[in-house]
Amino acid sequence: MYNFISNYEVDGSFQLGNIKQELNIFITPWTIAHFISGYIFYFLGFNYFWGFMIHSLYELITLTNKTVQQKWKHVYNGFKKDSYFNTLGDTIFFMLGMFLSKKYNNLYLLLFVILIGFWFFSPYYQNYLIKQRLNFWENEHPELKNIPNKEYIDQNYFFWIIWILVSIILLIKLKLKKQI
């Protein structure tokens, strides 16, 4: 099944118990992170070519590397891997972030991106995404409610702290850029 957009992070291959399903969704909540990453990459000096290459390498690794897939499986119960359709969407939004960073690089857009990242990477929102994903699958397949050991994983503060540090670096870079 192909969908253009989803409020839930349910793209890709899913298997929990005997239930297997594939969804192909172009835009998911995590597309926000790809857009933000593209914005930051250009802001930090990467050109379109290198940004595209690095992002494509990241997407290739998440599609093919078993270790990475196992890591995500622990965060998103039943997750196996993203779809190619979502990989294309994430890459387009990454490049869109780079484009907007090049064309409209100013304090207001930077502050907007920082605030969006602060909200998105917060453990609270990430826990919400995880719970919504499981609720989605339970609504699609009521028999999942009986599977033992399906616990929500509380997101730690690692990515949130990293985002705060990146935000500080971006603001310092913008301030230095204006002085030059």
Image (cartoon, grey):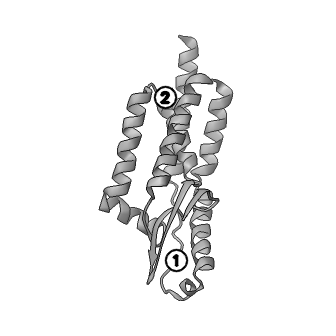
Residue that numbered label 2 is attached to = 42
Dot 1 falls on a residue whose secondary structure is loop
36, above or below 125, in the image:
above
75, above or below 161, in the image:
below
Q: Nearer the viewer, residue 93 or 111?
A: 93
Q: Nearer the viewer, residue 14 or 112?
A: 14
Label 2 crowding class (10 Å Cα cut-off): few <14, some 14-19, many 20+?
A: many
Residue 129 pos. (x, y %): 59, 62
Dot 2 falls on a residue whose secondary structure is helix
Counting labels gives 2
Residue 105 visible in this rendered orientation of the protein: no
At 44% across and 75% down in the image, what residue appears? Answer: 15
At 44% across and 28% down in the image, what residue appears? Answer: 48
Question: Which one is in front in this view, the residue at disc 2 or the one at disc 1?
Answer: 2
Give the side of residue 23 with respect to residue 105, left or right: left
Residue 115 pos. (x, y %): 65, 41
Label 1 crowding class (10 Å Cα cut-off): few <14, some 14-19, many 20+?
A: few
First in sequence: mark 2 or mark 1? 2
Q: Residue furthest top?
A: 180
Q: Amino acid at mark 2?
A: Tyr
Residue 155 pos. (x, y %): 52, 62
Q: Nearer the viewer, residue 103 or 92?
A: 92
Residue 103 pos. (x, y %): 59, 23
Gap in angstroms between the C-alphas marked 2 and 1: 38 Å
Residue 137 visible in this rendered orientation of the protein: yes
Residue that numbered label 1 is attached to = 151
Q: Residue furthest front?
A: 1
At 61% across and 46% down in the image, what residue appears? Answer: 118
At 58% across and 55% down in the image, what residue appears? Answer: 28
Q: Amino acid at mark 1?
A: Glu
